[in-house]
Amino acid sequence: MTQIEFKNVCKRFSEKRVALYDVNFKVKKGDFVFLVGKTGAGKTTVLRHIYMELFPDEGDVLWEGISTRKMRKSEILKVRRKMGIIFQDLKLLLNRTVSENIEFVLRLSGEKEVKPRIWQVLHNVGIVGEAQVIAGELSRGELQRLAVARAIVTSPEILLADEPFGNINKDDAIEILKILMNFNSSGSTVIIATHNVELLGEVKKKRVIEIDEGRIINEY
Amino acid sequence: MSTKFYLNELAYLWKRSRVEINFLFLLFFLSGLFFTLYLSGYTYLANLRSKVYETAFCKVFLQEGVPDDYIVFLKDFFEKDPDVKDVRFVDKESALKEFKSRFPRYEELLKLFKENPLPINFELKFKNELLKRRSLEEKLEFFSQFPYVETVQSNYDFVLRLDRIINTLFFVAVFLFVFFTVIFIPILSSITRTILQKEFHLFELIELLGYDTKKAIWTIGIAAFVPAFIASLILAGITLIIDSVAPFSGKLLYAIPLFILFIQLLVLVDSTKP
């Protein structure tokens, strides 16, 4: 079943700056997709179209067959609740503890059993020992894990990760990748935007979409 | 969305912005208390002035042998005077009775005279509009120049002094109020913005996570509104006490907590604009 479809998507931020040019691809439910390309290639713009922070100037982005441009705000919010997002700038609450960061999302979603869920997800990402540490005091690798934990704690249908391996060492990056692969094995879709192509070999069953200057130049 | 989430966020905001929130509360409470006490003093004096004014009067003493038709003319004249509220003619007999009742100790002195020495007079009460020293003096001077008028006396001095104090207090209050308001609004706005801006990033995050931000904005708005609300509540309590024990109506004092709520609401609405 096609979950996301980009049909001839064009996006211009200004006359001179074309972010996406005639982008076409499909993502099926349960896919593990890498969006690769240099910095500024348009990977983040693609993700922002998926979580509907941006809308195409031309063409269409379809979420389960429905054009995102035709969705009302309440529908957009409803779809976003099915997503887990790891933002490039993480958007963590740095003045709160690790567990409070997770609790924020769980409480927001109206979850009642909060404590066991927090413990479980922190255990899964390997930072259960840091539960009571203020997020601002964590290392970059730990922050990435926390961002992953926050994104997956509500068991979303799709996980969008924008540069989840940025500024961390290879071991940490592999650990995070394993967490994402594990999450994917439960049937959820994972889309990772990264410029780090070294890690692609770690995943056997995957799709790779290569972007350069807003165009898809390779797909396999 | 869970109510507990918003209660948690409320608690976080108070914890994180306790310095600003305490400062806001103190600012509202102390300035409100100052104006409540000031306005109480002002209302008390204004009330006292009204009471004293009710008992104050002016006496126009007439010479012996004034013709009756002239007395009728004067009475008519005083009654038509727009500044005069009440006119009472006191004949010699009434003047004697009044003297005896007011000064019983000196009653014996009257026996030294063969005839009743007390002059006939008009007792006049003036309207509030005449409460200006110069206009009152002009009026008394004008009456004293009438034919057959022996002398004109009044006991409006105290009320005039009170009036001057009240007028001064009023102008000082207006100045202080304008001064406080002009100084207050930027301070309030700045503190409220500081409180809210710490939370603006939450709105973006909440929306990106797929939830409506309206309730979050309300929560943060309520949190920033609480200091003004508590200060107003305490001030309303103080006003209630003043109203029940003071010899004047303290209804006007309730305007202060209401004004505090109003001004904080305005500042809050303005500050929620990112």
Image (cartoon, coloured by chain):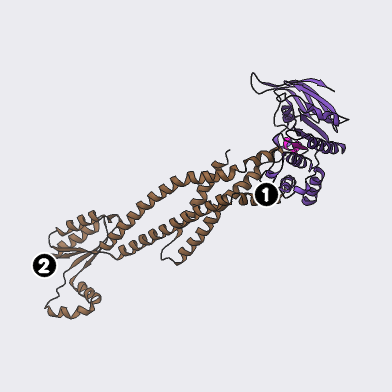
**Crowding at mark 2 (Cα within 10 Å: few <14, some 14-19, many 20+):** few
Asked if residue A202 shows in the view, the reply is yes
The answer to if A180 sits in the magenta stretch is no
- Can residue B268 be seen by looking at this rendering? no
Q: Name the residue nearer the viewer: B234 or B120.
A: B234
Which residue position holds label 1?
A: B6
Residue B53: quarter of image: bottom left
Q: Colour of chain A?
A: purple
Is residue A161 or residue A5 the one in the foreground?
A161
Residue shown at 25% from the left, 76% from the top: B101
Residue A88 drawn in magenta: yes
Instruction: For mark 2, give the secondary structure.
Output: loop
Of residues B51 and A175, the one drawn nearer to the viewer in this rendering: A175
Magenta span: A76-89
Q: Chain of mark 2?
A: B
Mark 1 belongs to which amino acid?
Answer: Tyr
Which x, y percent locates residue B70? 15, 61
Label 2 belongs to which residue?
B65
Q: Position of residue A1 (x, y in %)?
A: 86, 30
Asked whether, in this view, residue B73 is left or right of residue B170, the answer is left
How far across and down, in percent of the image, does residue A13 sit? 65, 23
Chain B: drawing colour = brown
Q: Residue at x 47, y 66 (%)?
A: B244
Which secondary structure, mark 1? helix
Residue A63: percent from the left, percent from the top?
Answer: 78, 30
